[in-house]
Image: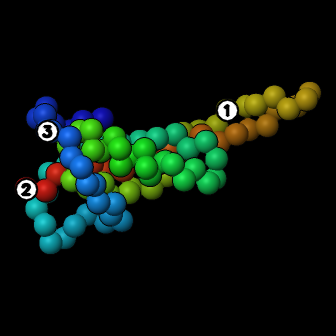
Amino acid sequence: MRYTSSQYAPTTDVEILQIKPPDRRFKEIGLLSIRLHNNRDENAVLYLVERAREIGADAIVILGEISGGSVAMPVGTMFVAVPLRDLQALAIRYE
């Protein structure tokens, strides 16, 4: 979800941060999200970085996982609840 109507040229390097940078001015340009498919989805952060590059972000701030509820998956004659989780990051651009 974009926070601004401004368009930016794609960037080449995107920093990965755990907190918003306290010592640099920046503009929040969007919220990025990806559905996690298993407990070790190593490509999730790489996807968020690539998406951030496309929209012109200089960095992403990893916000963490959020629950998207669950779905019932059939297993034999039973159903098992499978949690849906998304990894979210804030895309920022330095001023």
Pointer 3: what residue? 8
The disc labelled 3 sits on which kind of residue? Tyr
Q: Residue furthest left?
A: 95
Chain-order first, disc 2 or disc 3: 3
Q: Is residue 16 above or below residue 10?
A: below
Q: How is the image coloured?
A: rainbow
Mark 3 crowd level (few <14, some 14–19, many ≥20, 10 Å Cα):
few
Say which of 58 and 87 sits in front. 58
Q: Is residue 92 visible?
A: no
Pointer 1: what residue? 71
Which residue occupies 28% across, 54% down? 14
- Quadrant of the image occupied by residue 7: top left
Relative horizontal placement of residue 90, taking residue 82 as reference (left or right):
left
Q: Residue furthest front?
A: 12
Q: Which label number is shown at residue 95?
A: 2
For discs 2 and 1, the disc positioned in front in the rendered view: 2
Chain-order first, disc 3 or disc 1: 3
Q: Residue 38: where, in percent of width, then height?
A: 64, 47
